[in-house]
Amino acid sequence: MASCTPIHWKKFEKFLLFVGCHFEREKGDHRIYWRDGLKRPVVIPRDAELPVFIIRNNLRILGIDTEKYLEILERI
């Protein structure tokens, strides 16, 4: 089984758009995404690569497990 690895923020943005999030706003170097049914927004920094802890925290907000996340990444 593959595990979560750091990825470029643009690739994670494609994932967010695929799961139904939309770009809300940008503050500094952080991009904020929103989707109906979320208790809080998904925030990602515009760094070269997103660390695993940021990916996992945002997956928890979205209610998506790591296996489903990796399946979606293969498709996009």
Image (cartoon, grey):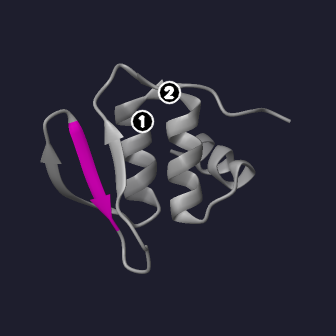
Q: Which mark is residue 11?
A: 1
Residue 4, by quadrant, is top right
- 10 Å crowding of disc 2: few (<14), some (14-19), many (20+): some
Instruction: Please tell me which residue is depicted at 69% across the width and 55% down the height of the picture.
Output: 68
Report the predominant secondary structure element of the magenta stretch: strand
Q: Which mark is residue 7?
A: 2
Which amino acid type is marked by label 2? Ile
**Image position of 58 (left or right of 52):** left
Q: Where is residue 61 drawn, in percent x and y?
A: 51, 61
Which amino acid type is marked by label 1? Lys
**Boundaries of the magenta span:** 30-34
**Which type of secondary structure does the marked residue at label 1 adopt?**
helix
Answer above or below: position of 13 versus 50: below
- 10 Å crowding of disc 1: few (<14), some (14-19), many (20+): few
**Cβ–Cβ below 8 Å for labels 2 and 1?**
yes
Image quarter hosting the N terminus: top right
Q: Where is residue 37 drawn, in percent x and y?
A: 43, 80
Instruction: Please tell me which residue is depicted at 46% across the width and 49% down the height of the picture.
Output: 15
